[in-house]
Amino acid sequence: MSQALLEIRQLDAFYGDFQALFDIDFQIAPQETVAVIGANGAGKSTLLKSMAGLVSSKGQVLSWNGAERGGWKAYEAVRAGVALVPEGRRLFASLSVEDNLKAGAYRQRKGYWTLERVFEIFPELIPKRNNPGSALSGGQQQMVAIGRALMANPDLMLCDEISLGLAPRIVKDIYLTLPRIREQGTALVIVEQDINQALAVSDRIYCIQEGRVSLTGAPADFSRQQIVDAYFGVRESAA
Amino acid sequence: MIWVNAILQGILLGGLYALFAAGLSLMFGVMRFVNLAHGDFIIVAAYLTLGVCETLGVNPFLSVLLIVPVMGAAGYGLQRFLFNRVLGQDILPPVLVTFGLSIIIQNVLLDHYGANGKKVTVGALDTASVNIGGDLAIGSLPALTFLAAVTIISLIWFIFYRTSIGRILRATADDAEIVGLMGANNAHTFAIATMLATAVVAIAGGLFAMRTNFDPSAGPIRLLFAFESVIIGGMGSLWGTLAGGIALGIAQTVGGQIDPRFQLLAGHLIFLIILAVRPRGLFSRRMS
Amino acid sequence: MTSMAPAILARLQNLSAGRPFWKALIGLLALVALAVGPLYLGRSEMRLLVEIFSYLALAQMWNLLAGYAGIISVGQQAYVGAGGYIFFSLAMLAGVPVLLAIPLAGLIVMVIAIPTGWLAFRLTGAYFAIGSWVIAEVFSIIAGQVTVLGGGSGISLPTSIVKSISASATGREMLLYWIALGLAAASVLLVWALMRSRWGLALTAIRDSEIASETVGVQTYRTRFIVYVLVAGFTAVVAAFIFLQKLRISPEAAFSINDWTAFVIFIVVIGGVGTIEGPFLGVVVFFLLRDTLADLGTWNFIIMGTVAIAVMLIDKRGIWGALRARGMPSVFPTNRVLDMEQE
């Protein structure tokens, strides 16, 4: 297999004394789209945050483009080419839409994405460009969050539950922009509770159940029942 | 007429207080950090201005300009290597570290310069005044200080609202965790904020040195004035801090007009009244 | 040598575990030994102990505020000065007997602390700290305006009032010594009893998580406020005694931030904030330092400030906190342990 863009081996993650992830192996190749599915509280967000450097992975194996970067901080990950669309959007409340987007370009990484191009795929935001982040609908906020991550021109974009709290129609609209993002060669990790969207767009999937990988492979390799079982933690009988 | 004059003086004094307050407000806004040694930093700037003036023989205003980068750099270092280490949920360490710093600074200054009051003379500007009609006259130096205050606050506004680093400073104030996802290193961002604050302190201290006698123990009361200006004006609002400074200045000068011994108390009382009836301040913009 | 330490600590733990009787006995003996101090101590030694007892009491109070209630104040000198001035007012202007004026001053200051505290509590965190400083300034300015008590230069206690404590100088020294000892002991018992009560449990919960304690019905504001007022009152009582002993009061001395806040904070922080034992250690360190650095003036303060910063950087739990973390048993236990073993 060609060199992985991001690789993680035997990752344990803790919040204080509480262990959220156990012995996770994960990898993603350049330009791949990988889905991470699992129930609420399974550890999906924690996995993404560990990749993005928000949760410490000190002393763990995390390599980026072949180089050991375990324990990297969020700002180091961004500079290397990772961008996270955080759970719950987390826009900067007092900044306008435009300022939120521009903030994403703080490190001025060169690439396809500019302010104009972000407005191109999210034209709904144009009339709102000077509004504060808090004055937007949920869907628009999600667009800003994604746009903000794009402005960092990442090689890998991590999307944490972008469908959370949004109406199905809006979710569909947002997912329709993903191909445009993939076109530019960005690898994507999509974390979702709603497995349908995730399965539809991904090349490979991981299923996380109570902090462990319960299933991994291409979506087509598994039956619906197998995925559901892995999601809820039903153990396979000896087979 | 004397009352109009008093109010006028108060407005101009408010300019100086706004300069005192700007640095304090800036640091709190970006990182929820309050520097109890803030007033002593102002006095350090005053002594530095005096020192540069005397040893290099340059114009006081040039002296102030010279110490701005020096103090700014010191502020950056202080934040990066000391203050950053005590930031966090617990409020005790920052209070204690800055309080300890305040005591150290006061006593180092006392040791080095002695307890006698000093002042930076600006020649004719010390007593010059401008007649603005009728019996009203405003001191040239206070007017200059007020102009400097407005200019500096405009400059800060420009930095915060029209530059990339300013955007990151505002974003950090909103959400210090997520701003890391923009590629910003908080350790550095915080230090930039303190660098800006300390640069403003340098100017505030320099101008202060030109109009008032100061000694090593003059720091704490300046901290109180800065703090009162911030609270009166409202937290989170740049121009509110100017308004707060002006309100405090007017309270003091009008109080002083009633009775010279009442001056300080009048200022404190206005602060306490605002605290009692409108704790968010006159112009607060957002939840702190 | 280092391998002996765990063994010694284990021995200490065994000694103290489940043997409150012995601890109480040792404590009682120490108290008695101090109480009969006038029999074997010289005058200057007694004076030093009086100072130590006073600072211990003030330190226990500041620790109660900061370490247990989470209220960081750099303005307690407001209540020290208020206590002193109100005591002088009662004794000199209202003719109240000295021994009654001391606790009465405390009560009056407690009443003053109610509206003052209400104002101060509009602020939180470090802003509360500075606010407490402003309040102290205001008290100081007001005290300086009271001409009948000497205004800005202060006033001395008339000899008639001094003599009313006890006719002989020795008698006075002994009585003042015992009052000081009593105040120190009372401060320790007050904090200890409070922390072992329901109030103490509430305070601990608030300190751990304000939000969580609110959800289980702890009234954060009220609990903290009551502690604040109590501390103000007791601080005033100690202050009344201090200025009785000094025989003189002035705004500068009464509201000195150095004497009543900087020193006290240093004592608590280096000894161990949030523990009752901490101030004991802190007081010892402070007076040793003061003794060795007596002639160095400003350097005394510079070193104190540096030590305070160093403690915060190295181990903010202070000396006692660091010892506790290494297994030192509690002398005044206030922790609660969940007993998992049902019968």
Image: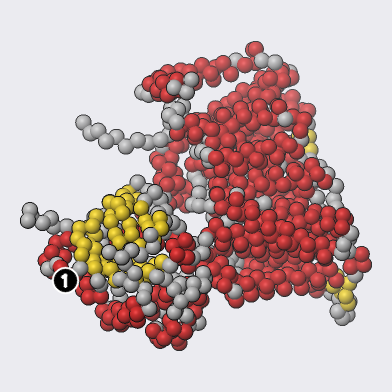
Q: Against B64, is C20 above or below?
A: above
Looking at the image, which residue is at 44% across and 22% down?
A: C3
- Give the position of the N terminus of chain B as an image quadrant: bottom right
Residue neighbourhood size for the residue with mark 1, other residues' Cα within 10 Å, grouped as few (<14), some (14–19), many (≥20): few
How did the renderer colour the structure? secondary structure
- Left or right of A40, for residue B83: right
Residue B59 position by quadrant: bottom right
What residue appears at the point 75 percent right and 53 percent down from the top-left corner? B44
Where is residue C132 shown, x and y percent of the image? Answer: 62, 50
* Total residue callouts: 1
Instruction: Tell which of A28 and C34 is nearer to you.
Output: A28
Q: Is the residue B93 above or below the residue C244 in the image?
A: below
Is residue A209 toward the left or the right of residue B86 in the image?
Answer: left
Q: Residue at x 61, y 27 (%)?
A: C284
Callout 1: SS = helix
The residue at the point 54 percent across, 36 percent down is C318
Q: Tell me the kind of residue under disc 1.
A: Ala
- What chain is tagged by disc 1? A
Front residue of this view, candidates C98 and A28: A28
Between C130 and C217, the one nearer to me in the picture: C130
Asked whether residue A62 is in view, the answer is: yes
**Residue lying at the far front of the rendered structure:** A2
Asked if residue A15 shows in the view, the reply is no
Mark 1 — residue?
A220
Q: Position of residue A5 (x, y in %)?
A: 35, 65
Q: Quadrant of residue C201?
A: top left
